[in-house]
Amino acid sequence: MLDANWTGTATTPSPGLYPHQWSWDSAFACLGLARCRPERAERELAALLEAQWAGGMIPHTVFNADLVRKGYFPGPELWLSRGRPEAPRSVETSAITQPPLHAFTALRMHAAASDGARSRAFLCWAYPRLVAQHGYLARVRDVGGEGLAAICHPWESGLDNGPAWDRPLAAVQPPPTSYARPSVPRSQPAGVDHERYAWLVTAYRDSGYAEGHLRDEHPFLVEDPLFNTVYLASTHALAEIAALVGADPAPHREAAERIHAALVRRLWDDEQRCFYPRDLRSGRLIRVATIASLVPLLDPELPVPIGRRLADLLLSARFAGAAGYPVPTCDLQASAFDRSAYWRGPTWVNTNWLLWAGARQQGMDSIADLLYGGTLRLIRQSGFREFFDPFDGSGRGSHDYSWTAALLLDLMA
Ligand code: 9WN
């Protein structure tokens, strides 16, 4: 299936619904391809890094020129990257990013490589590009000033219509005539506010994708625990890659220390015993427990008492404890929970994988086993679906979804 989804430069997330290259989908695909198709994994990560913008931003979508007419929205006509001096010349891309899992993935690819010399040469090529990606996040996205990277659009979180974005998105008020709904019908996500999504893009685009616009005017700016934990894990990986390619790991270690400290200081709510996103426009935490609240398990420096509280929350009746097919992406007891609505409740394999890697990181073996077994059971029962009902495990969304298959390969390696 992954071979069938290969375009020659990337693994499409799902051939019909998502025909282009996506940033974090490619990272997940590479984790799965690392052992069985190592050269292809390098080609895939290289294709993404070649689409990097001059300031270091890795776009969340790289459009396949042969397929743009297939009608995926948001296509290149929304972003208008072509001809922009800071955008790549060879391909059209989006102008926002996604969770920066790439340095983490590159290190795992190297660890799995049987041809050490080729793999090291790839790391030498990728390292300065990954450094530039992290430099962009530190320079442009640390609007809060304490080390975390802010996202400027729900699409950047990877969890597009997650309930944590409801409140900050409601504060975004597009002018009535700003945008016409696309005529192309989309099966997912259900219930998304396409007007607001598109308006956020056009407001940013009309500023010339200006860094100052993001900092001073952009109406949606949030520090998310999933995005920042992935950023932290990749920063640790960058230190290890630096040592492998003969560069200085010290600045990456310092950056990781700063991100870790800010993650706990700014996003951990000790009273509610939960990580929450922080809305930089209101200055407040967004107190909806979602799967993103649990991802900081991937922080190797997580204080032990916080790790225990996250484990309790994960196993409670709010998440794994009352779902036959864990882990639901939203607190089962939250009013926003919806068992079939994309990122508002269903179980996804990539978030299960992040929690599985986090549980292993914390030495929580029984939780890692639960996530491993539960994920295999879902796929055995329902196939390589995009997402799954957390109560009966039935498949939802598209078929032949790449990261579901790729992460199964990694789990079983
Ligand atoms: C917008 C490709 C992507 C994933 C995201 C998922 C969905 C796009 C969409 O599909 O987002 O980027 O059209 O809804 O939410 O996580 O990367 O699989």
Image: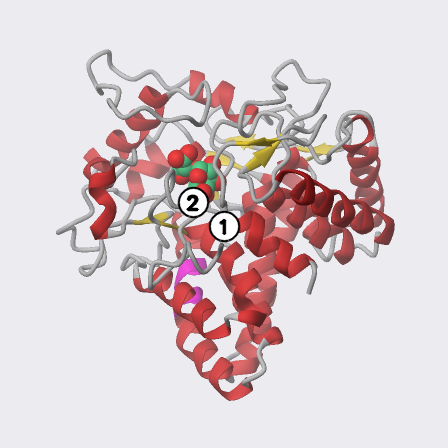
**Residue placed farthest to the top in the image?**
176
Judge: label 1 CB < 8 Å from ligand 1. Answer: yes
The magenta stretch spans which residues?
A: 129-135
Amino acid tagged 1: Ser
Which of the marked residues, 2 or 1, is nearer the chain's N terminus? Answer: 2
Residue ID at (56%, 23%): 163
Residue 264 in sight here: no
Q: Whole-percent x and y of residue 366? A: 87, 49
Q: Whole-percent x and y of residue 267? A: 64, 37
Dominant secondary structure (helix, strand or loop) of the stretch shown in magenta: helix
Say which element carries label 1: helix
Residue 202 in sight here: yes
Please tell me how crowded label 1 is: few (under 14), some (14-19), or many (20+) other residues with Cα within 10 Å. Answer: many
- The answer to whether residue 130 is magenta is yes
- The Cα–Cα distance between marks 2 and 1, rounded to whole angstroms, is 6 Å
Quarter of the displayed picture in which ligand 1 can be seen: top left
Viewer-proximal residue among 192 and 205 = 192
Residue 331 versus residue 47 in the image, above or below: above
Dividing the picture into quadrants, the one containing residue 410 is: bottom right
Q: Which residue is mark 1?
A: 402
Residue ID at (19%, 34%): 206
